[in-house]
């Protein structure tokens, strides 16, 4: 185990699906220990593909990393499977909340602890319920009956059961009401501050992600086109116009303004 250097580094990876569709084109990013790094981009930019490349889940979709390397905690992880990664403290929460709908919340959480001793399972359950009291209230209900937000909490809770050092969190805000999104991000921030967990957070919702992340990367067509401290990205006029949910007229005003010749008193 190395104690220096970033916890995760993705170095110039290319990913191809079915040997023909090049989806990531030399993507490079790093996640420092204890950081919350946002991976931003429109639908189809390559966020989920990046997460799956790290978690080594591309093969089942006929995808492969055709160039570049991925290192976690100083070690190349290209050939490790999900349980190897879990043992090293790396967990993925997939887009679209995959908890088993017919299992109770608690049984879903226990699935996340597959590799752990019994005593550790009870301890982990307690940790999850401390951060997600809603899950404790509903622990005996079938997960399929929960609200979308609670199902997202269940998916994150299940990842927590393995006591990860790092969580790859793919689009936690998707389909959720704004207040629930905030609730989930606040809990992520608490896990980061109190448990020292590191996050790589893929989000189309740049506005909320940049309020909770420390650093961000914006990707377009499988390439990083901007990176910087979260506050700097949130203040970037181009990002504000294209990704921060300004309404259509504000967006049109912004681009009309930059297209027009700037008045002399502004130069
Ligand atoms: N299994 C697959 N086979 C072929 N193309 C795929 C597959 N999965 C995703 N893609 C394509 O890769 C691109 C990036 O997708 P994805 O990583 O899901 O983007 P994001 O998560 O940013 O929305 C898209 O053009 C998408 O259509
Ligand atoms: Mg995605």
Image (spheres, helix red, strand yellow):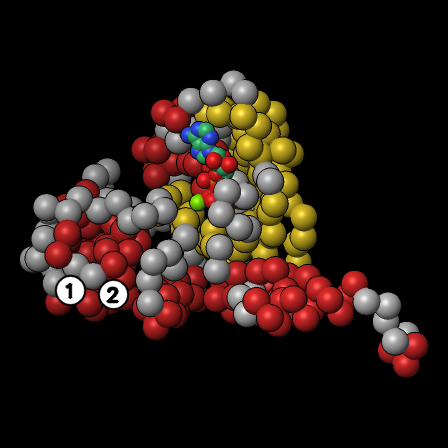
Spot the residue most to the top.
19
The 10 Å Cα crowd at callout 2, few under 14, some 14 to 19, many 20 or more, is some
Apparent side of residue 173 relative to residue 75 in the rendered image (left or right): left
Spot the residue most to the left.
140
In percent of the image, x 25 and y 59: which residue is there?
148
The 10 Å Cα crowd at callout 1, few under 14, some 14 to 19, many 20 or more, is some
Image disc number at residue 167: none
Image disc number at residue 132: 2
Q: Position of residue 134 (x, y in %)?
A: 19, 67
Q: Position of residue 218 (x, y in %)?
A: 60, 52
Spot the residue most to the bottom.
265
Callout 2 touching callout 1 (CB < 8 Å): yes
Most foreground residue, 43 or 62: 43
Q: Mark 2 near ligand 2 (CB under 8 Å)?
A: no
Question: Looking at the rendering, in which quadrant would you find the C terminus?
Answer: bottom right
Residue 229, visible in the rendered structure: no
Residue 92 position (above or below residue 181):
above
Residue 173 position (above or below residue 65):
below
| Residue 12, picture quadrant | top right
In percent of the image, x 61 and y 25: which residue is there?
67
Q: Position of residue 182 (x, y in %)?
A: 38, 70
| C-alpha separation, residue under disc 2 versus residue under disc 1 | 7 Å
Q: Position of residue 243 (x, y in %)?
A: 57, 60
Name the residue that disc number 1 marks: 136
Element type at marker 1? Answer: helix
Apparent side of residue 117 relative to residue 259 in the rendered image (left or right): left
Q: Mark 1 near ligand 2 (CB under 8 Å)?
A: no
């Amino acid at each position: 185990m190395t104690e220096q250097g970033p916890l995760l580094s993705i170095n110039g990876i290319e990913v191809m699906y079915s040997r023909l569709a090049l989806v990531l084109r030399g993507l490079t990013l790093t996640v420092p220990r204890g950081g919350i790094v946002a991976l931003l981009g429109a639908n189809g930019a390559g966020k989920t593909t990046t997460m799956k490349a790290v978690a080594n889940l591309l093969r089942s979709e006929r995808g492969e990393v055709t160039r570049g390397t991925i290192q976690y905690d100083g070690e190349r992880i290209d050939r490790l499977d999900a349980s190897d990664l879990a043992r090293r403290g790396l967990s993925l929460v997939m887009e679209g909340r995959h908890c088993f709908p017919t299992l109770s919340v608690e049984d879903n959480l226990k699935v996340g602890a597959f590799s752990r001793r019994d005593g550790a399972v009870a301890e982990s359950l307690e940790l999850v319920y401390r951060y997600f009291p809603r899950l404790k209230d509903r622990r005996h209900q079938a997960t399929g009956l929960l609200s979308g937000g609670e199902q997202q909490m269940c998916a994150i809770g299940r990842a927590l059961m393995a006591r990860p050092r790092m969580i790859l969190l793919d689009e936690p805000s998707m389909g959720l009401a704004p207040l629930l999104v905030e609730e989930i991000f606040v809990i992520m921030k608490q896990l980061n501050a109190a448990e020292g967990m590191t996050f790589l957070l893929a989000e189309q919702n740049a506005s909320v992600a940049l309020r909770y992340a420390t650093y961000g990367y914006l990707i377009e067509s499988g390439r990083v086109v901007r990176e910087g401290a979260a506050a700097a990205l949130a203040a970037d006029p181009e990002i504000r116009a294209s990704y921060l949910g300004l309404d259509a007229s504000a967006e049109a005003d912004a681009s009309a303004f930059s297209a027009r010749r700037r008045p002399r008193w502004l130069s």
